[in-house]
Image (cartoon, rainbow, N blue to C red):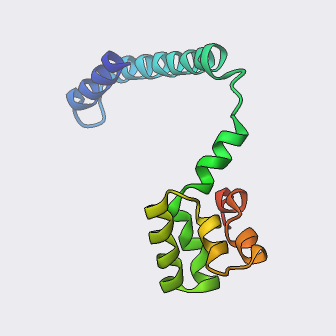
Amino acid sequence: MIGNDAAIAIGGMQGHFELNVFVPLMARNLLQSIKLLASASRLLDEKCVSGIEANREQCESYAELTLSAATALNPYIGYDKASEIVKKAAASGRSLREVAREEGVSDDVLDEALDYRKMAQPHG
């Protein structure tokens, strides 16, 4: 890949006006690189990616411990209260949801604001 890239770059630099005699070399190397990338992608899928399954419980627990998700609470409870919750959660090592409940935030608001699946969806 690196050799093909270098050959294409040098071939592009050595051409004069529109009479670049290196166009066949550049095209051959580009096509060879495309074939190599396609083969590598298929092998990566076959040998590494196929069969991988996420540990949902562990992923959800990591998501619950993410303090940056508190920004989603801002529209519901305000920046000041959300930052207070983050500080308490960081100091105690507990989740945002636990601390927010103690601070009087309702479960309905928490479920709506801290919907991690919804956060992961692109907006558009």
Against 88, is 74 above or below? below
Would you say 62 lies left or right of 79 here? right
The residue nearer to you, when weighing 69 against 98, is: 98
Would you say 89 lies left or right of 3 here? right
The residue nearer to you, when weighing 12 against 19, is: 12
Q: Quadrant of residue 116?
A: bottom right
Q: Where's residue 2, x and y in %?
A: 32, 20
Q: Residue at x 68, y 25 (%)?
A: 52
Would you say 94 lies left or right of 120 here? left
Q: Is residue 21 visible?
A: no
Q: Is residue 112 visible?
A: yes
Q: Where's residue 60, x and y in %?
A: 67, 48
Total residue callouts = 0
The residue nearer to you, when weighing 35 against 46, is: 46
Would you say 13 lies left or right of 2 here? left
Q: Residue at x 46, y 19 (%)?
A: 33
Q: Quadrant of residue 48?
A: top right
Q: Residue furthest right?
A: 108
Q: Quadrant of the C terminus?
A: bottom right
Against 4, is 91 above or below? below
Q: Where's residue 17, x and y in %?
A: 25, 37
Q: Where's residue 3, x and y in %?
A: 31, 16
